Image (tube, helix red, strand yellow):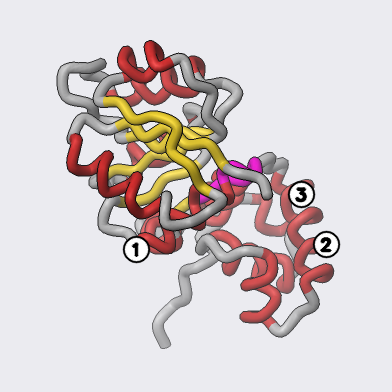
Amino acid sequence: MRRIRILVLDNQALIREGVRTVLERHSDLVTVADAGTLDEAVRCGCSPDVVVAEPLLAGDRPDREALVRELVATFQDSGVLLLSQIENLSEIEVHLASGARGYILKKALSSELVEAVRRVADGEEYLQPALGAALLKGKSRHHTDKRSSRLTSREREVLRVLALGHTNAETAEILSYAVRTVEGYRSRIMQKLEADSRAELVKAASELNLLHFEQS
């Protein structure tokens, strides 16, 4: 069985201990190290599959955006999953654009954290569903984009559900489609929108205002 190697990076020891406890309940997850600063993480010399990191580290780089970029560059062979209490949607978008592969809040369920780690380890991107919904709703209700005309009504329907953070299988169940059908839609949507990742799908759906419905 494959074991996912994880580095936990947070300036609070209690948080690091809690994250380790949650992850190590699962036999496929192993925490290889934890650290309070990026410099400590570098000195540990480990090569994790996933770095679970708080983008705000006391005594470390004061610029969160710069810190995330440095994290991604330092652990370029790892997936960086940000675990934070910061809910600023604009900042989250910046972090994802900087190369972080996922974002989840500290108030999330432990099951969500485990799922996020596994997805990032598999090379996927993860955005906590509640954040995906908030990100979409927080955009302008009147913004339009010519890319919208490229999508069929069914493709827009699939994109709405995917943008909320659901997997292909979950989307298929919600929309009563076969999983292969959803996979085909997703592939065509990404090609039409020139999107290379889940984060870009979420951003495109937000810009296209696809989750907004006028009140009757």
Task: Identify residue for label 2.
Answer: 184
Task: Identify residue for label 3.
Answer: 192
Q: Tell me the residue at 46%/14% (across/down).
A: 45
Vertical comparison of 160 with 175: above or below: above
N-terminal-most mark, 3 or 2? 2
Secondary element under disc 1, as helix, strand or loop, is loop
N-terminal-most mark, 1 or 3? 1
Secondary element under disc 3, as helix, strand or loop, is helix
Is mark 3 in CB contact (under 8 Å) with mark 2? Answer: no
Question: The magenta stretch spans which residues?
Answer: 120-126
- Image quadrant where residue 138 sits: bottom left
Foreground: 36 or 170?
Answer: 36
Q: Tell me the residue at 68%/70% (across/down).
A: 169
Secondary element under disc 2, as helix, strand or loop, is helix
Disc number placed over residue 109 in the picture, else none: 1
Q: Single out the mark in the foreground, 1 or 3.
A: 1
Q: Residues within 10 Å of mark 3 (few under 14, many from 20)?
A: few
Locate residue 151 relative to residue 21 in the image: left or right. Answer: right
Locate residue 54 relative to residue 28 in the image: left or right. Answer: left
The disc labelled 2 sits on which kind of residue?
Answer: Gly
Q: Is residue 121 magenta?
A: yes
Q: Is residue 35 visible?
A: yes
Q: Is residue 96 visible?
A: no
Q: Single out the mark in the foreground, 1 or 2.
A: 1
